[in-house]
Image (cartoon, coloured by chain):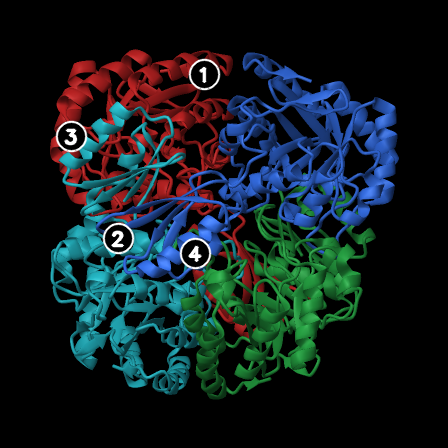
Chain colours: A cyan, B red, C green, D blue
Amino acid sequence: MIIILKQNAPRAQIDAFCEELRGMGFSINDSQGAETHILGLIGDTKSIAESWVLANPLVETCRRVSEPYKKANRKFHPDDTVVQVGDVKIGGGNFAVMSGPCSVESEAQIVEVARRVQKAGASLLRGGAFKPRTSPYSFQGLRAEGLELMRHARAATGQPIVTELMNTEHLPLFEDVDMIQIGARNMQNFELLKAVGRQKKPVLLKRGLSATLEEFVMSAEYIMAEGNEQVVLCERGIRTFEKSMRNTLDISAVPMLKKMTHLPVIIDPSHAAGLSWMVEPLAKAAVAVGADGLMIEVHDNPAKALSDGAQSLDPDQFDALMAQLRPELEFFGKTLN
Amino acid sequence: MIIILKQNAPRAQIDAFCEELRGMGFSINDSQGAETHILGLIGDTKSIAESWVLANPLVETCRRVSEPYKKANRKFHPDDTVVQVGDVKIGGGNFAVMSGPCSVESEAQIVEVARRVQKAGASLLRGGAFKPRTSPYSFQGLRAEGLELMRHARAATGQPIVTELMNTEHLPLFEDVDMIQIGARNMQNFELLKAVGRQKKPVLLKRGLSATLEEFVMSAEYIMAEGNEQVVLCERGIRTFEKSMRNTLDISAVPMLKKMTHLPVIIDPSHAAGLSWMVEPLAKAAVAVGADGLMIEVHDNPAKALSDGAQSLDPDQFDALMAQLRPELEFFGKTLN
Amino acid sequence: MIIILKQNAPRAQIDAFCEELRGMGFSINDSQGAETHILGLIGDTKSIAESWVLANPLVETCRRVSEPYKKANRKFHPDDTVVQVGDVKIGGGNFAVMSGPCSVESEAQIVEVARRVQKAGASLLRGGAFKPRTSPYSFQGLRAEGLELMRHARAATGQPIVTELMNTEHLPLFEDVDMIQIGARNMQNFELLKAVGRQKKPVLLKRGLSATLEEFVMSAEYIMAEGNEQVVLCERGIRTFEKSMRNTLDISAVPMLKKMTHLPVIIDPSHAAGLSWMVEPLAKAAVAVGADGLMIEVHDNPAKALSDGAQSLDPDQFDALMAQLRPELEFFGKTLN
Amino acid sequence: MIIILKQNAPRAQIDAFCEELRGMGFSINDSQGAETHILGLIGDTKSIAESWVLANPLVETCRRVSEPYKKANRKFHPDDTVVQVGDVKIGGGNFAVMSGPCSVESEAQIVEVARRVQKAGASLLRGGAFKPRTSPYSFQGLRAEGLELMRHARAATGQPIVTELMNTEHLPLFEDVDMIQIGARNMQNFELLKAVGRQKKPVLLKRGLSATLEEFVMSAEYIMAEGNEQVVLCERGIRTFEKSMRNTLDISAVPMLKKMTHLPVIIDPSHAAGLSWMVEPLAKAAVAVGADGLMIEVHDNPAKALSDGAQSLDPDQFDALMAQLRPELEFFGKTLN
């Protein structure tokens, strides 16, 4: 960390500050020029908050030179992490498609969708049981019953299941789930992150609507710091000023996250735009930019969906999409799991 | 709700859609012009999600005419709500100042700060025990012990205490707290909102960093829908492109929220800018714009604060601030509680 | 346009308002329900500003049903527009690559780069002569001399040239340029848009850093309304909260703009991220999502570039990029011009 | 400027880079630690673009220590600048109100409004002759005729006039105007900034909708670098995600701009929210936060305004507003000019 001191900072106070920093275990590279006085901190600075440094009246500004994340950092782990969910591999050249309805609504629905998406080439079945909704008056999901229906669908197809956890108290209900999703609105629900970090299942972490990529990786670091390194990152659109779509897909997040971390990165084109007709071009772009997978909403009857129908494909549309993605994946040298 | 149909929508399908809507309990005002075909839905539309309507292939677009919130809506509750915390009133002409350190660090610290802010005119003592931090390696608060120290400070001064709840499982620890704060990052942690809605203590709800005002009010509605109508809204700065400050205070939120809702609205100028020298001008603006209170960070030694020192006032600075705010409050006809 | 009236609006004033609207040439579909009173305006509403309607104290809110743009609207012009610059076609299956340095710096530089990018497969030579710089103390471009050097490069290779116009007074200097670029900062410089609309050369219009897509199309409409329909739209990254890149590429803009308009849409991956290593994955995504072309910065020695070197490829890197894009273009059925 | 080098940068190349920097007139403070290697540049770095430094493959990152603006910088000019327009002073404790219609529409209108706002206490008459409109089909202002009508209004009241310039070619028409406004959309129209910098009239510079404060000050620096130091900065709302208002007033911009620069800073509450009922609370906040003036839209009949009626006060509402602001200005020790 580089600390730039104020020009008129008194020497005695600077010395006391340096003493304090040394007491915290850092070496200091003190470099005073005619116009600038810089302290270079040497040591493991990830436990120092910038806000703590900036609170010191001697300090003009400071800047990290090393990243504040360690377990997620590609510098210390150059190879791609491959996350395994059941038999399905994600990352390191393995491409996975997670499909299913926004909300689980009935056994017939989820089993039918599961059969169709499996046949079309999806690797995992996704479906929402606990639903975060902006309004308390909107359908909140079938909750525990929805989890039960997901298990029935898995029994019918053998596909691993992924579903969203909203609260640490629900964790016992998720024992038989294959992959736990943390939703965008909970990306900085730090108690929840710690809780999924303390259990063993792989975690699908969605990016918050206005989170920076560093904040996103720090949330993965929360999970990993507790011992669970099976984390898949999911870009699902960020909030921008654009009104013609629900969110704006940040496609650049894929190469940047892959530079910052060794974790797999997937794209959710359904939530990104919120428009079913836009899933196809965005999915193609996701493959081309180097994503490790896709999360796509498929509903047996989108017009009747209890949530997010406007962005869902029906099973026939999903078949058509997969027919286009297969040769593109081959072109780009990816293995569809 | 106004539903605008596609120009070429087949009549038979429109009739079926209208039938479905009537079956949900709505009356329909069907108005077909040469270029536009509009359905006006009459009834309580707050349970209808726009996404459900938009998913129908007949629909071009839709727009709510009535607000999706009811209990928080000033239309149905024209008078200002006054929230009472201990003896302190907030709203309806009563102005409350909540002050104290970002993090509770020790008994000596919190008792000293409590005494100083009370003497200067603060109404409530705030202090963080459970701390949401971006990094898992940063100080996470004294947690249960911090709550205990807050109670000691209350015993010393008699001031009610307000502190942040991060997880439903911690709720039993908060039994003896006077007001529960829900932080910006948990504004859409819906399970947490429901849980504080089911208990009786007043709730201080902070706005999410990128939340719209309607989303903010919908989160208050979550709490109120469970039966707890003692909610105070807190604007604490939104994320913008500006780099010279941490966040950007949205001062317009005060008059707009007061038009939308009957709930008290306070301002947190400390978190808004993240700069202690900016607390004074922003606090003055908050009083002038009509806010019902302020939340201000005060630390006995900001340069040594374990979190957010750069934005904390020291007790002398807080004295000076209050000396300026008292006459301004009088000028604007507000009662300092 | 749908106008929703206030619930308590007096009938006499509503009648007077309707009379005024009819006097402007509109028919009115008046639909009064129990809770809502809606006026549907029938006729060409693109000359009515929403702000004018909203200023009427009778009006609760209003919403356009038809788009405010006409000449750019795909509804009235279903086929793709193909813009021709010299022999180069852009749009309708024709893919064009525009390459060259951010700033023209010397004859040797621009001729050398022109030869290299042409050989690698670029269709047009781009280069900046008039440079919009944030600081008045930064290099402002070679200006008229830079245009002269661009012409020399064209004489050497035969490639058409595209360069930025910043002020209507410079227009006479651009007589011999093949395509005029309007930069992101001038997207709403309406006098400049009108001026390039009154001349005959094709125009490359870059999206403003925080412009919505509708605002972007309205700026194209400004040019087209003056008689020049040869407009190519260029998405070049929008401003977001992300700090690891200069801007965020809005890849979704391509399919959405192609739905809204019939104009060709190209991507500038160099300005989008501001990082040379990210040009390749973003260019691949641009091809996959359906863009009609790319604008890519190439400099003979990026480390010595007078502007924007961090995002420039050197000629060898550009060769390698084109070698990857050729088979991808073939895979997606596009013709490289 | 601090330059942080890559860890593995070869010594020979670093030496060559340092030689190059010295050749540009800088001294170098070279500080190599175990993990970081930092170059501190000493000298006038405002002509160095960060992008130039970042383009060097040896460089990890860089950071300015000194501001890139000089003439606008309060560090080199600690006293408040007072800008004088006719007899009206702005800044340094002098508070000015600029009022009038968004668009000049007729002689009767502008003279009537001028008389009313003068009587109520406004210092300058504002009115738009050249209007930047999003749509080419919206009213574009009376242009040259509008300027003529502004002069008639000045003849009737004696108040100085301020109006917007959109293009350098129109400058001769503005000879008899007292203060030239540069609109938000032209904040980075650098050729226009240079042109108003080369003439002598005071300039009112409005902040761009998504501009950072540093970018805003750099645009003022463009004007000042050409020799005209009579610049007033105007915050008029920034673009955010909020939908209930047109823009979000950035009230914090006032204290921050006053820390960065010595120029007067005024607030435009009319454009900020776009809602006439919100002008009063925002104007009060502007006074409290320390602004040097207000720009307020007043129209004789807002419901009939050709542009922006929804945000205009009528003359009676403006009387009521000024009656509230006078005692508040006195309370805060400001002189209404």
Measured in 3D between alpha carbons, the distance from the residue under mark 2 to the one under mark 4, in whole angstroms, is 25 Å
Q: Check contact, mark 1 vs mark 2: CB within 8 A.
A: no
Chain bearing mark 4: D
Expressed as whole percent of the image width and height from the top left, the position of residue A234 reads 31, 64
Q: Residues within 10 Å of mark 3 (few under 14, many from 20)?
A: many
Residue kind at label 1, given as amino acid type: Lys
Residue drawn 27% across the image and 46% down it? B134
The answer to whether tags 4 and 3 share a subunit is no
Q: Secondary structure at mark 3?
A: helix
| Residue bearing mark 3 | B147
| Residue bearing mark 4 | D54
Residue D199: quadrant of the picture: top right
Measured in 3D between alpha carbons, the distance from the residue under mark 1 to the one under mark 3, in whole angstroms, is 32 Å
| Residue bearing mark 1 | B334
C199 or C67, nearer to the observer: C199
* In the image, residue C221 above or below residue A29: below
Residue kind at label 3, given as amino acid type: Leu
